[in-house]
Image: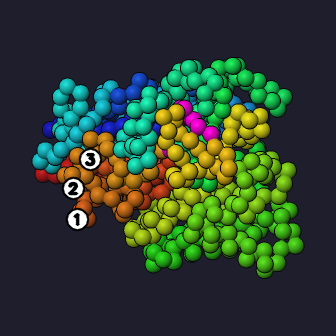
């Protein structure tokens, strides 16, 4: 008697969906199972996702050099190879930060190649549809989207990237204000659409809400994207740029630069024993009291940080007082991330660029941040596979989020361009909290000390938090209302097991419903990395699904 065809849906098919499908292909190839997999994504470039779309603006760069893009290889026999090989990069070019669109093209090529290498008994069908609802049908699931319903499915994986979210209070007020006065209020992405809109902003002042990686993309789009160029340390305008670009945030600081090259980067490599110590600290923190978790982890960070500070020339005659400086920095980071930075925006940026180039000894913060960057795979491995109290999840994810200003830092070239624009007066970064922003008929009046400027255009570069409560996507809100999804804690994502199975509000596993990505923040950590798209969660999910299917097919 033939085996029943088991139906699986992957909803959202960017890089993370591709990682899940590749894992499923590998595990299905080892078992006697039949699989019919439906992929749902409305975008034009399967496996790329919106942030890496091949038709996105070329001024938006990856924040990793080619040498650091160490993704698992495609399925056996693939003709695509790894990304550096596919790009044809070698030698000095390995230091390049390529456009994000190139990564999207690679993902799309990897997917198209995968379709030619499916194991016997497995089919894959792509549907260019937005799924808007999911409901139980006995022990299976039916999905709503497009003109009808789809299914039933034995297993549904939500791999949604950043689901649509509602505006926060400030954004909602500003959107109403912009509509009332006929002012442009735009999102940072897609950058190609932003460049098109900005072609009519010449001579205007443009505000950018936020000063993270997305804001740097906006600055690039409003300069290089409009035909300007950098030459011999100067910016040569095209004449199409805004008169002034004013990015702002609560502290007014841009992300730190990544190390300039592999030689500088190697200075921050943790030793094998330091990796072991951090693993032990993470395991201890995750099973211990929530109030002690971060202190336990920071104690394991302190000694490697002090070793690197001594080896790189800062505090060469370090004594106990210098060790105390590291401890104080980490204590401040636990309480108020970024509060250690007292310098102005431009001074801090210049110092960061000198540290990234190896021209100046690195600061405590730079060393801690680069160590944390290198420990991201270890952090995900231990954290994602462990049970942890809600309080520990909040503490650990908050700590990781704060250190992203280093661990997710920007290319040196991008920040050097930003500095050049600031020194030329085209970019005017500043700190501004809500009381310092006044809404007028002319736009947004931004104050900093005794200086004020009014932006007649506003670009929002602040991404929604990786949390369940602000999500407005109807698929997700419907599952929340049906108790299929529940938050780990306030301000965090959905509860799920280490293999991605959803856990409902009563603590029970929701049969056949699986999650991966930002939506699981708190159950998982550091999910924004491209490397996490091909990580252990996808492997565990595929293994669990194939095992369940095998049990079902063998049942009498």
Where's residue 265, x and y in %? 74, 51
Where's residue 43, x and y in %? 39, 27
In space, the residues marked 1 and 3 are separated at their CA atoms by 17 Å
Residue at 48 percent of width and 34 percent of height: 441
Residue indicated by mark 3: 477
Residue at 75 percent of width and 75 percent of height: 323
Local SS, label 2: loop
Crowd rating for badge 1 (residues with CA inside 10 Å; few <14, some 14–19, many 20+): few
Left or right of 350 in this view: 554: left
Question: In the rendered view, would you say 375 is above or below 304?
Answer: above
Do residues under tags 3 and 2 come within 8 Å of each other at their CB atoms?
no
In which quarter of the view is residue 271 placed? Answer: bottom right
Asked if the magenta segment contains residue 499, the reply would be no
Q: Tally the numbered discs.
A: 3
Res. 24 in view: no
Local SS, label 1: loop
Residue bounds of the magenta highlight? 453-462
Task: Tell me the tag on residue 483.
Answer: 2
């Amino acid at each position: 008697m033939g085996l029943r065809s088991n139906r699986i849906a992957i909803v959202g098919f960017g890089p993370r969906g591709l990682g899940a499908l590749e894992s499923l292909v590998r595990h299905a190839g080892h078992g006697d199972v039949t699989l019919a997999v439906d992929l749902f994504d409305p975008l034009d470039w399967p496996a790329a996702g919106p942030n890496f779309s091949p038709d996105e603006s070329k001024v938006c760069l990856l924040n990793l050099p080619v040498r650091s893009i160490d993704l698992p290889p495609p399925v056996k026999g693939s003709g695509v190879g790894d990304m550096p090989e596919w790009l044809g990069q070698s030698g000095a070019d390995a230091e390049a930060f390529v456009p994000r669109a190139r990564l999207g093209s690679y993902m799309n090529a990897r997917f198209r190649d995968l379709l030619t290498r499916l194991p016997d008994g497995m089919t894959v069908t792509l549907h260019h549809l937005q799924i808007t609802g999911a409901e139980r049908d006995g022990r299976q699931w039916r999905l709503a989207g497009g003109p009808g319903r789809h299914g039933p499915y034995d297993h549904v994986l939500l791999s949604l990237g950043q689901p649509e979210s509602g505006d926060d209070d400030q954004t909602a007020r500003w959107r109403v204000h912009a509509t009332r006065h006929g002012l442009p209020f735009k999102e940072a992405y897609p950058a190609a659409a932003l460049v098109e809109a900005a072609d009519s902003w010449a001579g205007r002042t443009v505000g950018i809400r936020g000063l993270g990686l997305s804001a740097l993309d906006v600055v690039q789009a409003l300069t290089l994207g409009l035909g300007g160029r950098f030459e011999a340390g100067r910016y040569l305008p095209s004449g199409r740029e805004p008169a002034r670009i004013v990015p702002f945030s609560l502290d007014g600081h841009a992300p730190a630069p990544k190390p300039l090259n592999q030689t500088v980067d190697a200075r921050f490599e943790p030793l094998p024993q330091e990796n072991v110590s951090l693993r032990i600290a993470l395991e201890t923190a995750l099973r211990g009291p929530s109030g002690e978790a971060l202190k336990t982890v920071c104690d394991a960070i302190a000694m490697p940080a002090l070793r690197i500070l001594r080896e790189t020339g800062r505090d060469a005659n370090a004594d106990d007082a210098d060790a105390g400086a590291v401890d104080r920095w980490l204590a401040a980071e636990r309480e108020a991330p970024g509060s250690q930075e007292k310098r102005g925006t431009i001074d801090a940026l210049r110092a960061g660029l000198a540290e990234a180039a190896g021209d100046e000894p690195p600061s405590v913060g730079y060393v801690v941040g680069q160590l944390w960057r290198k420990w991201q795979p270890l952090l995900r491995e231990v954290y994602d596979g462990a049970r942890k109290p809600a309080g520990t999840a909040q503490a650990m994810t908050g700590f990781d989020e704060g250190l992203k200003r280093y661990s997710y830092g920007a290319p040196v070239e991008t920040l050097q361009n930003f500095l050049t624009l600031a020194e030329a007066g085209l970019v005017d970064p500043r700190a501004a909290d809500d009381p310092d922003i006044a809404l007028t008929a002319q736009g947004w009046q931004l104050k900093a000390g005794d200086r004020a400027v009014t932006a007649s255009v506003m670009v929002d570069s602040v991404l929604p938090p990786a949390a369940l409560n602000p999500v407005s996507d109807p698929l997700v809100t419907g599952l929340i209302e049906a108790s299929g999804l529940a938050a780990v804690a306030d301000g965090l994502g959905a509860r799920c097991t280490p293999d991605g199975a959803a856990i409902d509000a009563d603590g029970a596993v929701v049969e056949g419903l699986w999650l991966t990505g930002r939506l699981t923040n708190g159950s998982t950590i550091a999910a924004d990395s491209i490397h996490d798209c091909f990580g252990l969660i996808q492997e565990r999910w595929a293994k669990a699904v194939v095992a369940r299917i095998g049990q079902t097919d063998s049942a009498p």
